[in-house]
Image (spheres, rainbow, N blue to C red):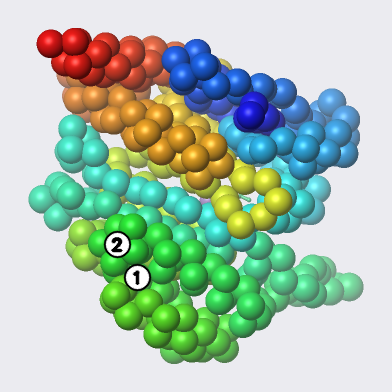
Amino acid sequence: MALKIALLPGDGVGPEVTAEAVRILKNVAEHTGKSFTFTTHAIGGVAIDAECVGLPDATREACLGANAVLLGAVGHPKFDGRLPSERPEAALLALRQALGGFANLRPAMCYAPLANRTAFQTDRVRGADLLIVRELLGGLYYGEPRGFDASGDTAFNTLVYSRHEIDRVARVAFDRARERKKRVASIDKANVLETSRLWRSVVSEVAKEYPDVAIEHVYVDTCAMRLATSPTSFDVLLCDNLFGDILSDQAASVAGSLGLLPSATLGGRVDLYEPVHGSAPDIAGKGWANPIGAIASAAMMLRFTAGMEREAAEIDHAIEDALASGARTRDLAGPGERVVSTRDMGQAIEDALIEARESRHSYHAV
Ligand code: NAD
Ligand code: IPM
Ligand code: MN
């Protein structure tokens, strides 16, 4: 069966990094004989510019008719004066809602060759391997009412969670932990927030069904500190929508660069894959962006939507091999290290993929 992929390159570095993910997916299609079809659609600032709407109906329908969506990034400083509902980011939030995925998986690991790139102490970060499971369709992002009062001097948002919303994402976290180191840290602010009281009690109930998985409840502020001082003490981090957003960028500092982190959003009608980073307007169009987050997102697509675990793992290994061979985009390069472009990093990963296959063949041939 063909895998229908809707591509939404979006704004800023989005098109640059998406192109490298497509390069890798095309290589896998060619190698395996599987049919991947790609269609490209507008979202975000480019869609506002062209069609006066961030999520055109045609884009939404194309995504709903696909097997998976691969998004680059949305957002541009020229929209900074606008209300949230009129910005490119609103299109992404609307797309997430339309696709229905509530569990956003954001793995962050310290790649051995990059241990010196962490914002924290190298010795403490080495070996870190985290999975943030972020609730993606609830909480402050979507809670009603929201807005400004008539005077414009008061603004408000609503933090609301239901038992059902917490239960379903908690199960994803525990299921993933079973495939990993069997530890879940549930992140909340239960010393202050009612929603966190409910969060903690629902997660504790779900935990009883997973006696083989260790559960700890961690306040979000302590979690931020522990991510900096002892990230290896975590395995799966279960977070609400806002805490997961913030902590995943901090986890990127553990890994060494925001450009490294991928994500998969599961549980809805169509799975959505996107790097964790934004449109990076400060480096857009320069060929400096790190495509690894986008490429690793494509690997997650093969793993979770296409059931191609082997090919997904091969891409993950090729990323590690390319890094081990010294390939560094600007965000990864230390003093004196040679810098490669976005495209060259994509090429280095494709080369590593091909080389790994060839060495396996020659091994079998012996
Ligand atoms: P950002 O993630 O775009 O950039 C933060 C910093 O990380 C910048 O210095 C940038 O150069 C760097 N960076 C990001 N991605 C990189 C990559 N692939 N390679 C190398 N360096 C990279 O965050 P921001 O600057 O706060 O936001 C810019 C815009 O992106 C805003 O409009 C924001 O709302 C939007 N945004 C979109 C998404 C998304 O589409 N999923 C995610 C986050 C932010
Ligand atoms: C992310 C981004 C988005 C979010 C924005 C662009 C709406 O920061 O995916 O991490 O906050 O979810
Ligand atoms: Mn974010």
Per the image, label 1 sits on a secondary structure element best described as strand
User: What kind of residue is marked 2?
Assistant: Asp
Front residue (pair 119, 108): 108
Q: Position of residue 192 (x, y in %)?
A: 49, 87
Residue under pointer 1: 184
User: What kind of residue is marked 1?
Assistant: Val
Is residue 331 visible in the rendered image? The answer is no
At 41% from the left edge and 18% from the top edge, which residue is drawn? 346
Mark 1 closeness class: few <14, some 14–19, many ≥20 residues within 10 Å: many
Residue under pointer 2: 235
Front residue (pair 86, 130): 130
- Label disc, if present, on residue 329 of the rendered structure: none
Asked whether disc 1 touches disc 2, contact meaning CB atoms under 8 Å apart, the reply is yes
Mark 1 CB lies closer than 8 A to ligand 2: no
At 35% from the left edge and 48% from the top edge, which residue is drawn? 108
Relative to 349, say whether 274 is above or below: below
- Label located before the other in sequence (1 or 2): 1
| Horizontal side, residue 204 vs residue 2: left or right | left
At 22% from the left edge and 35% from the top edge, which residue is drawn? 114
Relative to 230, say whether 300 is above or below: above
Give the Cα separation between the discs numbered 1 and 2.
6 Å
| Horizontal side, residue 191 vs residue 222: left or right | right
- The image quadrant where one finds the C terminus is top left
